[in-house]
Image: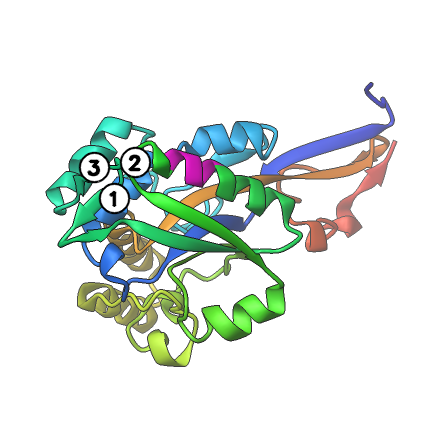
Amino acid sequence: MTNPNLKVMRYTSQRLRYLLLNNLNPLFQDKRARQGIAHALDRQGIINTVLNGLGEKCLTDYPPSSWVYNPKAKSYDYDVNKAKALLGEAGWKPGADGILVKDGKPFKFVILARAGDKQLEQTGTVIRDNLKAVGISVEITALETTALRRDHMTKRNFDAILWGRTVFTDPDYSVNWSTAAIDNAYNFVSYSNKALDALFEKGRATLNPDERKAIYAQVQDILAEEQPIIFLDWPSALNGVNAKFQGYSKENTSPPTFVWNLATWTVK
């Protein structure tokens, strides 16, 4: 039932959801294995079923609304055959029970998720089923948020974690991705890439917007290629305002600040 007195705006939020992979874990050290996992996941299916269609697949953690967004970054379609081929190239072969094996060790790991976050828990179930189809065995464990962060995420004590965060406005994400951030900031997956480190340094050294945009386009290319985490989706957000107000538009796309231009609004 529609309300003629309510104007609703749907937009892609700046909060993304992703699967953290501990890059120190031998299971995830070969980028072909990470790429295989990326191809194995039915992101659109997750959006359709878990988010009720209100979301958008993401390439990296740079949102489509960012002025440095690179739409040409590598994407990973849902493709079970590609997933199996990449995992095979990384040395993983089906065992007698169908689970992939390499050097005598099965491809099994645990995904931690926040207890009480129904969407993440449902997403974890889809991921588990998707990975089972390519020979990877996954167990989902729900933990209280504080314990998950304190005992696992910050201590790098995990295989994988389903998580989400709101991204920054400025494109310098070095606190998430630089080698220095492994011990001192938020590079929880312990990913290290010298080329990426150099790009972040260049990005901080110039104020020229065109140069910065080109630099961060390269950053996104590396992140999309390497898949240090598995980028899932940008959930949509909805804002509503009385239809009598004029001046409210798609520019008003952040719930905490959607009235930033309130002084220019008018009333019918």
Start-end of magenta stretch = 126-130
Residue 83 appears in the picture as rendered: yes
Tell me whether circle 2 and circle 3 mark residues in contact (CB < 8 Å).
no
The rendered magenta stretch, by its main secondary structure, is classed as: helix
Residue 75 appears in the picture as rendered: no
Q: CA distance from mark 3 to mark 1?
A: 24 Å
> Label 2 is placed on what type of residue?
His
The answer to whether 20 is drawn above or below residue 92 in the figure is below
The answer to whether 87 is drawn above or below residue 181 in the figure is above
Reading the image, the residue beneath label 1 is 35
The residue carrying pointer 3 sits among few (fewer than 14), some (14 to 19) or many (20 or more) residues within 10 Å by Cα, namely few
Give the image location of residue 173, x and y in percent: 40, 64
Give the image quarter of residue 219. Answer: bottom left
The residue carrying pointer 2 sits among few (fewer than 14), some (14 to 19) or many (20 or more) residues within 10 Å by Cα, namely many
Q: Secondary structure at mark 2?
A: helix
> Label 1 is placed on what type of residue?
Gln
> Label 3 is placed on what type of residue?
Ala
Q: CA distance from mark 2 to mark 3?
A: 24 Å
Residue shown at the point (28%, 73%) measured from the top left: 179
Judged left or right of residue 179, residue 267 is: right
Judged left or right of residue 219, residue 258 is: right
Is residue 26 part of the magenta span, yes or no? no
Of the numbered discs 3 and 1, the one sitting upstream in the chain is 1
Observer-nearest of 87 and 184: 87
Q: CA distance from mark 1 to mark 2?
A: 6 Å
The answer to whether 185 is drawn above or below residue 55 in the figure is below
Reading the image, the residue beneath label 3 is 96
Reading the image, the residue beneath label 2 is 39
